[in-house]
Image (cartoon, grey):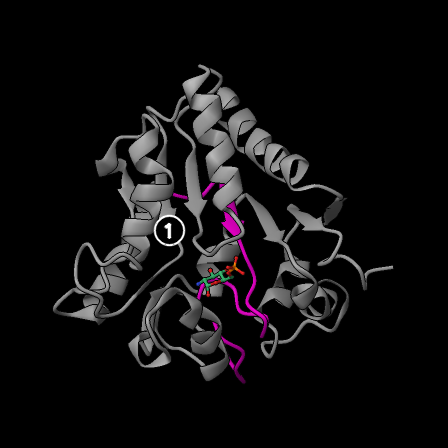
Amino acid sequence: MNIYTFKNEADFNATGASLIASLLHTKPRAVLGLATGSTPVGIYGRLIEMYQQGLVSFAKASSYNLDEYVGLPEGHSESYRTFMNEKLFNHIDIQLENTHVPNGNAADLEEECVKYDAMLEQNGPVDLQILGIGHNGHIGFNEPDDSLDGGTHVAELQEKTRTANARFFPSLDDVPKHAITMGVGSILKAKQILLLVRGEDKAEIVKRALKGPITTQCPASLLQCHPNVVVLLDQGAGRLLG
Ligand code: GLP
């Protein structure tokens, strides 16, 4: 595991964006595993700038997002499909049909999960998986539990997660209670994982995840088992690592 700590946001974003751009240079048909949340937004912004400057192209790439809320109407401002379109896809040359986000409005959610895993199996493995981390150690929407699902599944969101994400909705009641998420098995199949964490409020969970015991009670701790993880932290998030 290679852990890098950054003093300023611009360097954090430039490093994350360069990693993705380098992959696309060596492998234009790369399969990207993408994440939402506030942390990757600056990296997506930097990638858009690089695309505009002719420094990177996504024309042959494809992408699979980690997760999506269940039940938000199509086009809802907080759906992860809308987020990805607005923060990245609409501004680069990726073919929209090559971008994949689980459909949280599928009539049969179980079937949607099976279909998503089948696509990942057929078109994967993911070359580079971007991840954030929740305050409780979740990755994607894999919440701490006695056991975890390997494949894509419908997850019930913990109160802590709903409360953390309530900042994006008019009220806590508006935050969906369920989401479709790739499972930890699918996430760990990626050839390389790029974990992004910012903020003092994440320092404790970063320490538990990266240096604590490997346990399903902290899903991000399973990343310690992966052979190729790059972690980008700001000083706040890295402050307890020593
Ligand atoms: C959500 C997403 C996660 C993300 C997490 C952290 O819960 N499902 O994939 O990693 O938020 O978000 P942020 O980067 O805003 O802290």
Q: Residue furthest top?
A: 54
Above or below for 170 versus 45 = below
Within 10 Å of disc 1 (Cα), the crowding (few <14, some 14-19, many 20+) is many
**Residue 239 locus on image (x, y percent):** 80, 60
Q: Nearer the viewer, residue 152 or 92?
A: 92
Image height of 106 relative to 45, above or below: below
Q: Residue at x 72, y 49 (%)?
A: 1
Residue 93: image location, x then y, percent: 32, 25
- Residue type marked 1: Asn
Q: Magenta stretch containing residue 131, yes or no?
A: yes
Q: Is residue 220 magenta?
A: no
Query: Residue visible at 68% across and 60% down?
Result: 224
What residue do we see at 51% from left, 32% from top?
A: 46
Residue in the foreground of this view, choosing between 80 and 121? 80
Residue at the limit of the structure toward the right, as seen here: 242
User: Can you tell which quarter of the image residue 162 is in?
Assistant: bottom left
150 w.r.t. 6: above or below: below
Asked which quadrant contains residue 14, the reply is top right
Tell me which segment is drawn in magenta.
Answer: 124-147
Looking at the image, which residue is at 26% across and 62% down?
114
Main secondary structure found in the magenta portion: loop
**Left or right: 232, with 192 as reference point:** right
Residue nearer the viewer, 122 or 105: 105
Q: Residue furthest front?
A: 170
Q: Is residue 212 left or right of residue 228?
A: right
What kind of element bears circle 1? strand
| Number of numbered tags placed on the structure image | 1
Percent of width and height locating residue 156: 37, 79
Residue identified by numbered label 1:
65
Q: Is any part of residue 125 visible from this angle?
A: no
